[in-house]
Amino acid sequence: MSITNLREELDKIKRASLYRELTPITPAGPTHGYIGGRKAVLFCTNNYLGLTHHPQVVEASIRATERFGTGAGASRLICGHSHLYEELETALARFKGAEKALVFSSGYTANIGVISALVGRNDLVFSDRLVHASIIDACILSRAEKRPFPHNDMNFLKNLLHSEKAKGRRLIVTEGVFSMEGDVAPLKELVNISAQHSCLLMVDDAHGTGVMGEGGHGTANSLGVADKIDIHTGTLSKAIGSVGGFVAGSCDLIAYLINKARPFIYTTALPPGIIAAATAAIKLLETEPSLIERLRSNIHFLREILTSGGFNLLPGKTPIIPIPVGDERKALNISQTLLEKGGIYIPAIRPPSVPAGGAMLRLTVSAAHLRAELEKTAMLLIELCRKDRIYP
Ligand SMILES: Cc1ncc(COP(=O)(O)O)c(C=O)c1O
């Protein structure tokens, strides 16, 4: 392929309003940043509790870096494993109510590692149509047969399971809180269906960990089925305020992954400062319940204003609020006006992150947002969406 081919391809992407560019942002706190020299409030960060800037988390990271250095130097199985990892994985297992946990370099690689280790050619994977790209990529990499089901459609799934027998394993995969829609999977029903059909059930709770359930223990906890999920995955990069992914489950599952999950085996361990920050954040969730209370009160406040302004939001208690726009160009225009007029940053979400014609503005709420910021954002959104005849 020549460079000219690449340009043609890029021009095509631009003409379809689907071109992506990196926007440099200088962080100025958990929910603020300087964009083009101007301070903006971010309504797109997954820093749900603002823990990236919590003094105890920052202090733990600095202390670990000073004592143990900036890098781990090798993969976990060579000499990159440390007592810091032991401490974090023990805390994560307790937090998820599982026997054991295992940390990966990211949530993306945790999903790739688990699925590609557990299923292969003779197996079947049943996944919700709206699962994250990391799960889709993991299924492709695993070479298992893929059987997607419409979003949260349990009847469709039951019929699929009745008609699709496998020679090997059958794995059901879903998310706790869906990353784009902000709604929740019917985990109680999924637990029953999975047990009736002798499947393994995996739940990626990247957006529910630290947010949903008592003490932020997650979506499965909020629905009373945490101990019925075979495989919990999640990330340390959202509410936990650090970076890395994790899997929690039985001792056998974790031992199997240590031996079989290639993205775990063949990569360098995370730096000490990252691990220490994540452990400090999990401890904070256990000792400072006001963090989650503030997040929930902000979510409620923003949802109330948007609803009274005419937005027909899906009912919910999660910090992800999608505003469907449809047309990519319109979504881009509103996003740009929000930034120019209000200093509010909400990038337009466009295909392939969402299906064609499904462009949206996706607001994410944080405990670190101020009431005045929530109110200003809601009012401006209402004004712009009315002007563009999107809503109401
Ligand atoms: C549902 C879901 N799973 C996994 C990931 C990947 O997590 P990470 O950013 O830690 O790689 C994301 C992140 O966007 C996500 O939304």
Image (tube, helix red, strand yellow):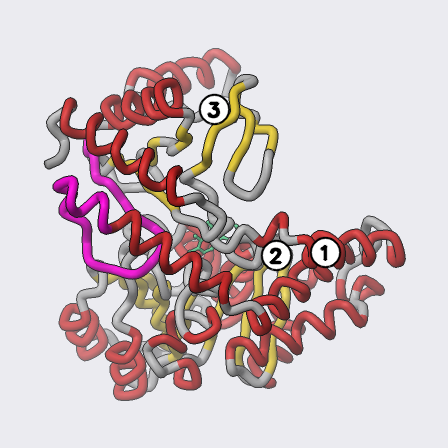
Q: Residues within 10 Å of mark 1 (few under 14, many from 20)?
A: many
Q: Disc 1 marks which amino acid?
A: Leu
For residue 186, above or below residue 316: below
Determine which residue is flagged by label 1.
270
Q: Is residue 256 visible?
A: no
Determine which residue is flagged by label 2.
244
The answer to whether marks 3 and 1 mark residues whose Cβ atoms lie closer than 8 Å is no
Mark 3 lies within 8 Å of ligand 1 (Cβ measured): no
Determine which residue is flagged by label 3.
21
Name the one closer to the observer, 86 or 166: 86
Residue 305 x/y as whole percent: 23, 45
What is the residue that sits farthest to the front in this orientation?
372
Among numbered discs 1 and 2, the one appearing first in the sequence? 2
Q: Disc 3 marks which amino acid?
A: Glu
Give the Cα distance between marks 2 and 3: 24 Å
Residue 179 x/y as whole percent: 37, 52
Instruction: Identify the residue at horizontal 41%, vertical 39% (top origin).
Output: 43
Mark 2 lies within 8 Å of ligand 1 (Cβ measured): yes
Instruction: Identify the residue at horizontal 78%, vertical 57% (top origin).
Output: 272
